[in-house]
Amino acid sequence: MIVLTIIVPIYNVELYLKECLDSVVRQIQNDNVELILINDGSTDSSGRIAKVYAEKYSFVYYIEKRNGGLSSARNAGLERASGEYILYLDSDDCFSKDTINTVLNALKNNDYPDLLIFSGIKFGENDTVAGRYEEQCGPNIDLPKMRGIELYKKLKSSKNYFTGVYYQVIKRKVLLNHHITFINGILHEDHLYTFETLTVAESAIAISNRLYCYRIRPNSIMTSNTNSVKRFIAYSITYKGMREWQIKYQLDDKCINKHIDEVGMAALKNMIVLSDSEYQEKLKVIEEFKGFIIDDKNSTMRLKLIALAEGGIHKVFIRLNKYKRTG
């Protein structure tokens, strides 16, 4: 029986991929773990490197697809997965030396909860530090088993809520039962996914073990500059998805409302700096966002918008007036 499926989306990471995969395969000692490598249309030698591991190890599976982005690659891995639990690893990052055993033992010792949250470190090169540096990142808290929604609130209140999916292990049946996947083609694809898994998990725990090693490197998705159009689209779609999820599962809670409003405000802040041409180009997405910003009965954002307007951000109301005239 496959207990754990590790999914690694791969795209043009030839400089880092071997370190990433070595950090996994050296820890796998039996047949209850599988490693799925998704080559998302790499144009460098990443595909060839990944194939070598699939040929060498019986528990490694290689999938090649046309480039579709990180969400698409993760979704492809989910479709192929057979493990009871899902764990993600980005191909320029790596695991700590005892990640797999720690995860499996934590699941077993806590009667196999739906969700496990853990911590990590970030590492990289810094001009002010000689050689490689490391520091703690992600959740850093120990919490006993409880409902996912309760763990979510404790993570938020203790400032230990992080959206990165690589800080969590989730039962595959939770994803299947609730039809949870990643939205293709947007930034911050982890936001909605993590919100969904935490709020529907029947049982969840958090451990402070630093099991994930997050590499800081130039030109990665998270460190590269992205424009306001992409950020607006990502936050507006995420806001809409979170609100629909809240309504579907009747998650009437102040903490959740505040969280969703924060995402909505992030969308608005990026919307108001769009140029007229960008605004017209993305008018359809803006119109879809309109229904939530104007008619959302669960939102407290109107009061926040008034405060922002008093501070001089009058463009928000100009654009909202446009919504009303076209709505």
Image: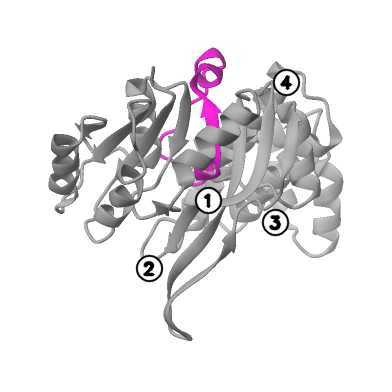
Label 2: how many Cα within 10 Å (few below 14, some 14–19, many 20+): few
User: Which dot, 1 or 3, sits closer to the camera?
Assistant: 1
Cβ atoms at labels 4 and 3 below 8 Å apart: no
Identify the disc placed on residue 114. Answer: none
Which mark is first along the chain, 3 or 1?
1
Residue 186 located within the stretch drawn in magenta: yes
Which mark is first along the chain, 3 or 4?
4
What amino acid is labelled 2 in the image?
Pro
- The CA distance from mark 2 to mark 1 is 19 Å
User: Which dot, 1 or 4, sits closer to the camera?
Assistant: 4
- The CA distance from mark 2 to mark 4 is 39 Å
Which mark is first along the chain, 4 or 1?
1
Which mark is first along the chain, 1 or 2?
2
- The CA distance from mark 1 to mark 3 is 18 Å
Magenta-drawn segment? 165-188
Q: Position of residue 131 (x, y in %)?
A: 40, 80
Q: Is mark 1 on a helix, strand or loop?
A: helix
Identify the disc placed on residue 315. Answer: 3
- The CA distance from mark 4 to mark 3 is 30 Å
Q: Is mark 2 on a helix, strand or loop?
A: loop
Q: Position of residue 266 (x, y in %)?
A: 65, 51
What amino acid is labelled 3 in the image?
Lys
Residue 135 located within the stretch drawn in magenta: no
- Which of the image's four quarters has the N terminus? top left
Q: Is mark 3 on a helix, strand or loop?
A: helix
Cβ atoms at labels 2 and 4 below 8 Å apart: no
Displayed quadrant of residue 35: top left
Q: Name the residue under label 1.
A: 231
User: Which dot, 3 or 2, sits closer to the camera?
Assistant: 2
